[in-house]
């Protein structure tokens, strides 16, 4: 037990991510894999989509995409986060990532997007579930968080389908291209029931 005046030991030890190669995660018919240079054109196309551009508040040139891939790969070694390309039969259909990693509190945030041609098929929820299973069962995270604009009910449905519990609204939390948005917060703990688990 922590004594008064002392600080708790980190829940996750430094190196719990950087000492490992970023994994490829099979999830049903999907494969979550690290980003690679050949994804540049697909990233540019993704961030040209109006919904992805709106909710992630950015677009990308080819140079931007190259820098973004380098950044995402470097975040893993720095233990600040990780990002996977969601693929089906070798084709990019979306992105899933964790960020804001706190090893001290074994906590991270989850972000994602799905390309238009793959929406409405449960891709995002399955990918989130695959990353959650890995984060909790392999690495030992305690909590994952997912937030989204209150104007984005589709993302709310994805969070709920992935088992994340709604926890409240942060007013004026995030700047989007059209101004400040209130954000819904969802959380999932390691010992929460997850979709597909048998707790009988």
Image: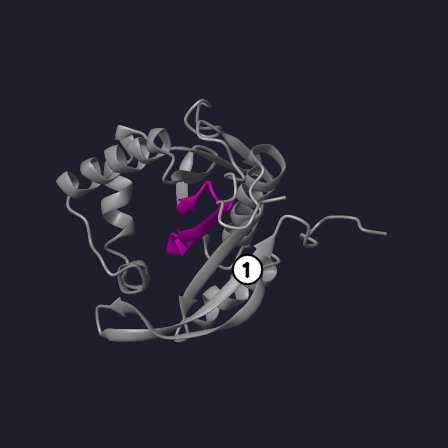
- Residue behind mark 1: 187
The answer to whether residue 161 is seen in the rendering is yes
How far across and down, in percent of the image, does residue 30 sit?
53, 39
**Which structural element holds mark 1?**
strand
Magenta stretch in the rendered image: 94-117
Nearer to us in this view, 39 or 74: 74
User: Which residue is found at the position 79% from the left and 48% from the top?
Assistant: 198
User: Which residue is found at the position 46% from the left and 23% from the top?
Assistant: 20
* Residue 191 falls left or right of residue 183: right
* Residue 62 falls left or right of residue 30: left
How far across and down, in percent of the image, does residue 49 sit?
28, 58
Residue 110 among magenta residues:
yes
Residue 103 among magenta residues:
yes
How far across and down, in percent of the image, does residue 18 sit?
41, 26
Nearer to us in this view, 80 or 113: 80
Indicate the quadrant where residue 48 lies: bottom left
- Label the magenta part by its dominant secondary structure: strand
* Residue 73 falls left or right of residue 190: left
User: Which residue is found at the position 54% from the left and 66% from the top?
Assistant: 157
Decide: few, some or many residues near mark 1? Use Cα within 10 Å; few <14, some 14-19, many ≥20: many
Indicate the quadrant where residue 102 lies: top left
């Amino acid at each position: 037990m922590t004594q008064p005046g002392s600080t708790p030991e980190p829940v996750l030890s430094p190196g719990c991510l950087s000492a490992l190669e970023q994994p490829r995660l099979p999830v049903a018919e999907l494969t979550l894999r690290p980003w690679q240079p050949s994804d540049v054109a697909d990233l540019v196309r993704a961030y040209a989509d109006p919904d992805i551009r709106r909710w992630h508040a950015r677009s990308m040139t080819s140079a931007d995409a190259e820098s973004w891939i380098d950044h995402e790969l470097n975040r893993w070694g720095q233990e600040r986060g990780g990002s996977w390309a969601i693929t089906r039969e070798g084709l990019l259909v979306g992105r899933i990532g964790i960020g804001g990693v706190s090893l001290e509190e074994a906590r991270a945030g989850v972000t994602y997007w799905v390309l238009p041609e793959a929406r409405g098929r449960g891709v995002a929820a399955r990918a989130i579930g695959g990353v959650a299973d890995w984060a909790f069962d392999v690495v030992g995270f305690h909590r994952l968080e997912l937030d989204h604009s209150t104007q984005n009910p589709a993302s709310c449905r994805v969070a709920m389908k992935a088992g994340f519990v709604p926890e409240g609204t942060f007013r004026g939390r995030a700047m989007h291209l059209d101004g400040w948005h209130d954000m819904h917060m969802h959380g999932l703990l390691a010992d929460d029931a997850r979709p597909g688990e048998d707790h009988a």
